[in-house]
Image: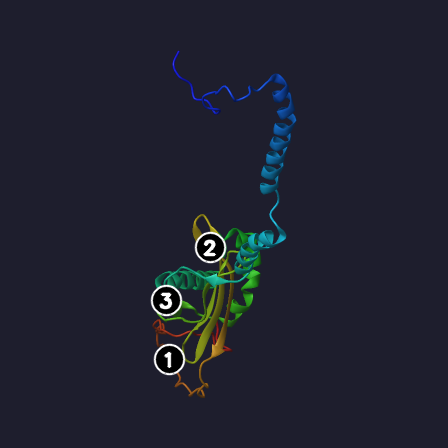
Amino acid sequence: MGGCLSLWGPRDEGLSRITQADNDQMKPILLRLLLAALSLSFALAGPLPAAAQQEKKAPRAAKSARQDKPRPAEIDRNGMLILVRSALLAVDQANKTGNYSVLRDLGAPGLQVNTDAQLAEIFAGQRKQGIDLAAVAVLEPQLTLLPQIEPNGMLHMAGFFPSVPMRLNFELLFAPANRQWKLFGISANLGENSPLAPDSPQPPAPAGAVETPAAPAAAITAKQKGTAN
């Protein structure tokens, strides 16, 4: 037979042999050593100390705190202009036609919970004032609140369209729907940009003259008091 590897090496005459009794005496010792090794391994795999647990909780708390604060939206100026102008022009067309179905269809699910009649009631004040928002198609908005993502995931921005004599202040909320930003909430009101000049008396129109419609102007306007619809 071939040679074998022995832990004991070659035997000498002076080396006593290991008897069965010796083996029986070593078994309890080996068992205690095995139990001690197992205990050590379980201790190493046991729960982390309190300090280590605190270190693991700290990054989670910091991440949660960041999520509770608004963060800048990843949108360029062109994207912002498209959202602002399309939202305000949709409201303008709905106010002029009295038909709010298109505005409702373009909105987010949170806006669509309102019926067409409810939307007409919400914007009744703007219709009564005769606010014309067509100029937002060419005027440049000035932002007072840069686009940001709120903790609830909505896109939020605010600003105004400079115009003379009045400017349009707006605030918009968009909700994500179908991988698009859809209008969720809107606030728009007029503010004076400069002192109003006194109205100059208009000469009476010649009898039988055909009324010439006014050309569209790059200005936010409202119906004058006493003017017929």
Q: Position of residue 200 (x, y in %)?
A: 42, 88
Q: Amino acid at mark 3?
A: Ala
Q: Position of residue 58 (x, y in %)?
A: 56, 56
Of 169 and 52, which appears nearest the observer? 52
Q: Quadrant of residue 209?
A: bottom left
91 vs 78, left or right, is: right
Of 72 and 47, which appears nearest the observer? 47
Of labels 2 and 1, earlier in sequence is 2
Of labels 3 and 2, earlier in sequence is 3
Look at mark 3 in the image and give the residue it sits on. Answer: 137
How far separated are the C-alphas under marks 3 and 1?
37 Å
**Which label number is shown at residue 152?**
none
Q: Amino acid at mark 1?
A: Ala
Per the image, label 2 sits on a secondary structure element best described as strand
In the figure, 98 relative to 132: above or below?
above
Q: Amino acid at mark 2?
A: Lys
Mark 1 burial class by Cα count in 10 Å: few <14, some 14-19, many 20+ = few
Per the image, label 1 sits on a secondary structure element best described as loop
Q: Quadrant of residue 135?
A: bottom left
How far separated are the C-alphas under marks 2 and 1?
51 Å
Look at mark 2 in the image and give the residue it sits on. Answer: 182
Per the image, label 3 sits on a secondary structure element best described as helix
Look at mark 1 in the image and give the residue it sits on. Answer: 207
Q: Are marks 2 and 1 in contact (CB under 8 Å)?
A: no
Of 165 and 19, which appears nearest the observer? 19
At x 64%, y 19%, the residue is 21
Q: Position of residue 121 (x, y in %)?
A: 57, 62
